[in-house]
Every structure is written in C-alpha cells, then in structure tokens.
Amino acid sequence: MFNQLTQKDIDAMEAEIEERKLVVRPKLLEAVKEARAQGDLSENFEYYAAKREKNRNESRIRFLEKMIKTAEIIPDDSKDDEIGMNTRVTVQFEEDGTVENYKIVTTMRGNSLEGLVSVESPIGKALMGHKAGDRVYVEVNAGYGYYLLIKEIDKNPDEEDDKLRSF
C-alpha cells in the first residue's frame, strides 16, 4: 500500500529527517556517552532514558524514510476557485444549518478532531473539485447521505496549519 502524500509533505519529511540526523542525533549520542560515564549502568536511570530517546529518534527517522520510499505523490491540479489538496473550506450542513471549517489533506494527515479531512473520506471525496456556492451531496453509504453548501474556499490557508501536526 502506498502513502498518499503531496510534494510539500515529502519536502517537510525530508527536512525533518535532515534535522534529526544532523542536529538531534549528535546531541542524543552525547547524552548517552555522558550518562554511560557516570558509572554503574544497572542503576543508571539517565543512561536508560538517554538510550530510549536515541532509539526514538532513530525509529522516527526510519519511519519517515519508509513513508517517503512508499509514497504516492498526489498532485494538486485544481483551479484557483476549486477545492483541492490543502484547501480550507467553510461548509454549511443543510439539515441543521451548522457551519464547519475543514482543510482537505492527504490520508496520512487526516484528523477530523482538528478539522483535517482526508481526501479519501466521504466528505473529502464529495468536496474535491467543487466551487464556493455549490450544493454537494455527501454519500456516507448506499442508504444515507446529506447535502452541504460550500460557503467559502481558501486556497492559501495559514502555514501554521501545517505545523500543528506532523506525520
């Protein structure tokens, strides 16, 4: 199975790998050396904590490298007035009139509690390619669906959105 990512996601992962290899790894190795130099390893909590942090860093590097290696790059070829990847959209539910804000993201970044809706989710699939003012039917399953009214589209959401949650 491939991880669906945008080129921007891959660039962010590569930057994190570089940071972890060039900055974090040397600091953690030094912490392990210092803790080991304190003597008896059988009761040395600092040594075990330093080793654990070093191993977490190495695991994170391997995870990110595997994600990049198995990634399927999803292009964002939507027009300026259409919903595409990394578009923030404001919708109104026709049933009760509630208004919600979502950002359409790749499957790896989806988190509905933070308003990050996967492009593979029913609402993500339904919204893709539509414009502000469109009435969209979201099919949840064969027997149920609901309508949304697209109120507003923002193709340039804050960069802070991307920093809220990494992979």
Image: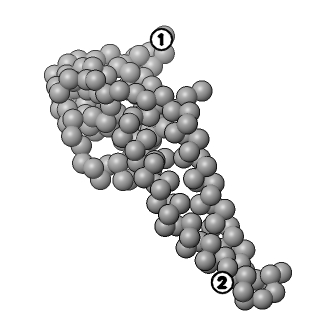
Q: Position of residue 160 (x, y in %)?
A: 29, 53
Q: Mark 2 falls on what kind of element?
A: helix
Residue ranking furthest to the bottom: 38
Q: With respect to residue 132, does 111 lie above or below?
A: below
Q: Position of residue 52 (x, y in %)?
A: 68, 67
Left or right for 53, reference 96: right
Q: Residue at x 39, y 34 (%)?
A: 6
Left or right for 112, reference 93: right
**Residue type, numbered disc 1:** Gly
Q: With respect to residue 117, does 94 lie above or below?
A: above
Q: Which residue is mark 2?
A: 34
Q: Mark 1 falls on what kind of element?
A: loop
**Residue type, numbered disc 2:** Glu
Q: Nearer the viewer, residue 70 or 124?
A: 70
Q: Residue at x 25, y 23 (%)?
A: 78
Q: With respect to residue 97, does 59 lie above or below?
A: below
Q: Residue at x 55, y 28 (%)?
A: 2
Q: Position of residue 158 (x, y in %)?
A: 24, 48
Residue 103 seen in render = yes
Q: Position of residue 50 (x, y in %)?
A: 65, 74
Assign the N terminus to one quadrant of the image: top right
- Label 2: few (<14), some or many (≥20) within 10 Å? some
Left or right for 78, reference 64: left
Q: Nearer the viewer, residue 151 or 60?
A: 60
The tag on residue 143 is 1
Residue 98 seen in render = no
The tag on residue 31 is none
Q: Nearer the viewer, residue 124 or 144?
A: 124
**Mark with earlier residue (1, 2):** 2
Q: Depth-wise, is mark 1 or mark 2 nearer the camera?
A: 2
Q: Nearer the viewer, residue 150 or 98?
A: 150
